Structure formats: structure tokens, C-alpha cells
Image (cartoon, rainbow, N blue to C red):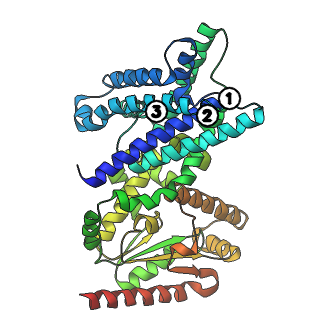
Amino acid sequence: MSKYMFRRYLLFVVSLFINAFGIAFITKALLGTSPITSVTYVLSMFTPFTMGVWTILLNLLFVVLELFLMTRKDLKEDLRMYLLQIPVSFCFGLFIDFSMMMLSWLTPASYASQVVDLLIGCTILALGIALEVKANAAMMAGEYFVKAITRRFRGDFGYVKLGFDITLLGIACTLSLVFMSGIYGVREGTVVAALLVGPIVHFVSPYYRFLDKWITDPLRSREEGTKRSENIVITIAREYGSGGHQLGEMLAKELGIKLYDNEFIRLAAQRSGMDEQYIVKNEQSIPSFWLKCILSKNSEQPLEGSLSADDVLFVAESRIVQDLAEEGSCVIVGRCADFVLKDYPKVLKVFCYSDLQSAVERCITRYGISAEDAEAEIRRVNRNRIHHYEYYTGRKWGSPHQYQLMLNTGSIGLDTACRLVKDIYREMEKKKVAAK
């Protein structure tokens, strides 16, 4: 095992403890526990076993049940991840009990202090989940169980996870009613944790990028960088109605390189197995930014392993972007290409924007949108692009620090914009030739 893989495992263990500490903090707030530990917390209230011991037992039950949901091929291909659930379950249960002991002093006296402790716990849990995703070394049994269900029945990971959490809450409430004649351990704090942790994970995840170099083999990175260093790629991010696609057409024609925009629909359909009409309808948008955060980010499942249709489409298009960049110099419009190619040395990143009136006029004349609907359509499409970009990249859409050129096509026009980009491209070509 390489030292970089060892570091990933180390980060994963640290994340497990942070998760356990966050859950303990939420539990000690006395407003209910998190959905994933609701059953084990309730069981600990009327049995001699602790919350940590019940966590170990429940997770081991998940490990056994997964066998009935997996084919031999699934088990063979994922044997390492499957077996790792066993030591992970023991560690997580022990960490929960240790954290509860560490926080034995925490006894909030007022409702306000309970709410504060709950919010602190949710933040700690979110920090742990984000770190676990960054480590990407193993999975907890509850998450793997959801993955097994999703894979077996071809569902959406986020919605299956939601159904799984609701089922656990139902079981916890039933156990509480039967054995304690009332509902205990499941309160408003449980709902708050379910709704709040995911969005917090989304916002804190980008701050873990400083760990990338520590857990990534630099030799492998250099080999990939050398392989990618020959081609010059122009990426064009754009506001709706700013003429980004038209600019791409002009550049491809004048520079004699390929343009990739609408072709992504066909390529993504081939790569992902999705219907082209679905891609046309859902590409570069997500149903709801906050709902997506709640369903997907409140999870230890890395994006590449998610079975959400939105995530599958994004991963498929990202890999297409990388493949096209390695095939030859080209222009790529949209698809978060500036982010996907962030580690490529020869990328010219362009952002096109314009004043509202110019965008409206272009929508009317080029896209055939009526004057009454143009402004609303511009705002709708831009809002979708913002949510899609910021959800998947963790970066602010349109931030000037992420691009070499910010072009106001409404004031300077597409001809001038094309000339500026072309001049910079030619300079990059000269440098490439001189470096050989």
C-alpha cells in the first residue's frame, strides 16, 4: 500500500471520529439525534447496551443483508469496500461511545442552548462527512446498504437514501412507542439535522482542497500533466444570450480547430446510456439546488460512485471533456469545462457576459424567443447554470479570478471578442513551439 493510500485511510479514520463526535453533540443537545442513529439511540434508552454497541450491531446487520442484494459479480468487483465495512462499523461504534463519554459534561439548561448545541453538532457532522468524501477510502455500512439497494433496483441514490432515513425514523418511533409508551429520541432536532447537514457539507467541501496534494501521488500527477500538455483548449462559459456558442463557432473556424457544444448530447448519451431527450431537458441544470444538497450531500457517497442521474450525467460529460482535451486542440462551450480542466496546463478560460438589453435582443433575433418572454428566460437559464456550476464545482460562477478573459460581448461585440481570444491563442501556440 502506498503512503498516499495510507494517508487516505488515515483521513477516513479521522473523519469517522469527527462524524461520531458530531452525532454525539447532536444527541447531547436533547432535541433528537440524526436519522442514521435514531434507531440505535432509542434502543440504548431501554436496553443495557450503549448507543455505540447498537451501532456496531445494526451496521453488521446491514453488512449481512447486503449479500442478498448483491450479485456475485458485484461482490467480486467491490470486495475490498464490502469487507472494510466490518472494521469501520466497530470503529464508528466505539467512537460514538467515546464521544458520548467526552461530552458527558454537556447538559444544556435552556431551549436556546439546546438549539445552539444542535447547530454546532450539525456543523461538526458536516465537516466529518465532507472529509470522508475527500478521503474516498471506504464506506460506512449504512451508506453501502443504500448503494446496494440503489444498484439492485436501479433507483436514484439520493431518493433511496431519503427513503432509508425515513424508514429508520419510523422504526425508531415504533420502538419508542412500544417499549417506552411515547416518542423519545426523535424530535425537531432530527429534522433539522436531516435538512441542514447536506447544505453545510456542500459549502465546506471546497475548503478541503488543500489536502489534494497530500493524498495524491505527485508522480502520477506529473505523468498526467505531461500527457495533457500538448493541446490548447479554449473553454467558454457564458451567460444566456451573450453569444458564447456563436463565439465558439467563430473561433473554431478561424483557428481551424474543433468546436464541441451540442455534440455533447450525443456523446453523453453514448457514455452514460441515457436517453438524448433526457439530457436535452436536464443538462446543466439540477431540479433544486437545496433539495440536491439535502438528498446527495448529506451522504458519505463520493460523486463518482453516486447513482443519481444528475451525477451520472455530470461525470460522463466531465470525462468526455477530458478525452476531447487529450485528442487535440479545441473549443469547448459550457459543461463546467474550466473546472474539469483546472489541472491542464494549456487552457484558455473565457467567460462571456452582456448587459440585459443586448442579451434580450440576441434571444429575440437568434433564438426566436418572444420579446415578452426573453427576459424571464434569460434569468431562468442563468439561474440554472449558476446552481449547476456551483453545486458541482464549489466555485462561484462568473468569478473573474477563474478566467483569463471576461468578455462583455454586449459592448465590445463578438468580432472584437473573437480577435482577443484568437490573439491569446496564437501566443500560447508560439510558446508551445518555442518550448519544444
How much space separates mark 1 and mark 3, taking CA atoms? 21 Å
In the image, what residue type sits under mark 3?
Phe
Between discs 2 and 3, the one toward the N terminus: 2
Q: Tag 1's secondary structure?
A: loop
Point out the frontmost of discs 2 and 3. 3
Against 133, is 107 above or below?
above
Disc number at residue 95? Answer: 3
Give me the residue at 55% from left, 59% from top.
390
The amino acid sitting under disc 1 is Leu
Q: Is residue 39 left or right of residue 112?
A: left
Closest to the observer, 120 or 300: 120
Residue at 63% over, 30% down = 28
| Circles 2 and 1: CB atoms closer than 8 Å | yes
Q: To which residue does mark 2 refer?
A: 26
The residue wearing badge 1 is 31
Tell me where residue 425 appears, x and y as whole percent.
40, 85
Q: Secondary structure at mark 3?
A: helix
Label 1 with label 3: CB-CB less than 8 Å: no
> In which image quadrant can residue 57 be found?
top left
Q: Is residue 267 left or right of residue 103?
A: left
The spot of residue 47 in percent (x, y) is 53, 12
Q: Nearer the viewer, residue 146 or 414?
A: 146
Residue 59 percent coordinates (x, y): 41, 25
- Give whichever of discs 2 and 1 has the lower sequence position: 2
Q: Which quarter of the picture shows residue 385?
A: bottom right
> How far apart are the two marked residues, 2 and 3, measured between alpha carbons?
14 Å
Q: Residues within 10 Å of mark 3 (few under 14, many from 20)?
A: many
Q: Tell me the amino acid under the disc marked 2.
A: Ile
